[in-house]
Amino acid sequence: MSIIFVLIGLSLFVAIIFLAVFFWNVKSGQYDDDYTPSVRILFDDTKEKKDTQSEDKKDKVSSKN
């Protein structure tokens, strides 16, 4: 019977630790931005712009030959 009291005390201690860590994360701003991660997949990745003028010149030179 005494093991039940030990387990209840241990589970309360672990629950208090998790609650303290949760409040610490909320206070430090861990959960401030909850909108951006859900829509981040909808945005395109940024790609480097190619120099279209140099490609046009290459096409003109190759068409003349």
Image (cartoon, rainbow, N blue to C red):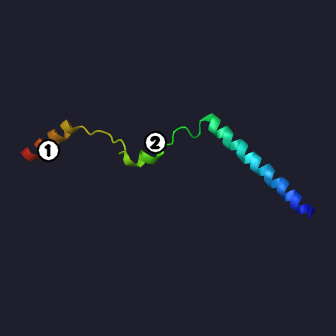
**Crowd band around label 1 with a 10 angstrom C-alpha radius: few (<14), some (14–19), many (20+):** few
Per the image, the residue denoted by label 2 is 36
Which of the two marks, 2 or 1, is nearer to us in this view? Answer: 2
Using residue 23 as the reference point, say whether residue 37 is left or right of it. Answer: left
* Disc 2 residue crowd, few under 14, some 14–19, many 20+, Cα 10 Å: few
Horizontal side of 58 relative to 39 (left or right) equals left
Q: Quick check: can you spot residue 65?
A: no
Marks 2 and 1, the one that precedes in the sequence: 2
Which quarter of the figure is the N terminus placed in? bottom right
Residue drawn 77% across and 51% down?
14
- Describe the element under mark 1 as helix, strand or loop: helix
Secondary structure under badge 2?
Answer: helix
Q: Which mark is residue 40?
A: none
**Residue 23's spot in the image, x, y percent?**
67, 40
Q: Residue at x 67, y 43 (%)?
A: 22
Instruction: Name the amino acid type tagged 1.
Output: Asp
Going by the image, does 24 lie left or right of 6? left
Spatial distance from mark 2 to mark 1, Cα to Cα? 42 Å
Q: Amino acid at mark 2?
A: Thr
Q: Nearer the viewer, residue 27 or 64?
A: 27
Q: Residue furthest left?
A: 64
Q: Position of residue 46 (x, y in %)?
A: 36, 41
Q: Can you identify the residue that label 1 sits on?
A: 59
Left or right: residue 24 versus residue 61 is: right
Residue at 21% over, 39% down: 52
> Residue 10: percent from the left, percent from the top?
83, 54
Q: Verify CB contact (< 8 Å) between mark 2 and mark 1.
A: no
Residue 5 seen from this side:
yes
Q: Position of residue 45 (x, y in %)?
A: 37, 44
| Residue found 63% across the figure and 38% down from its top | 26
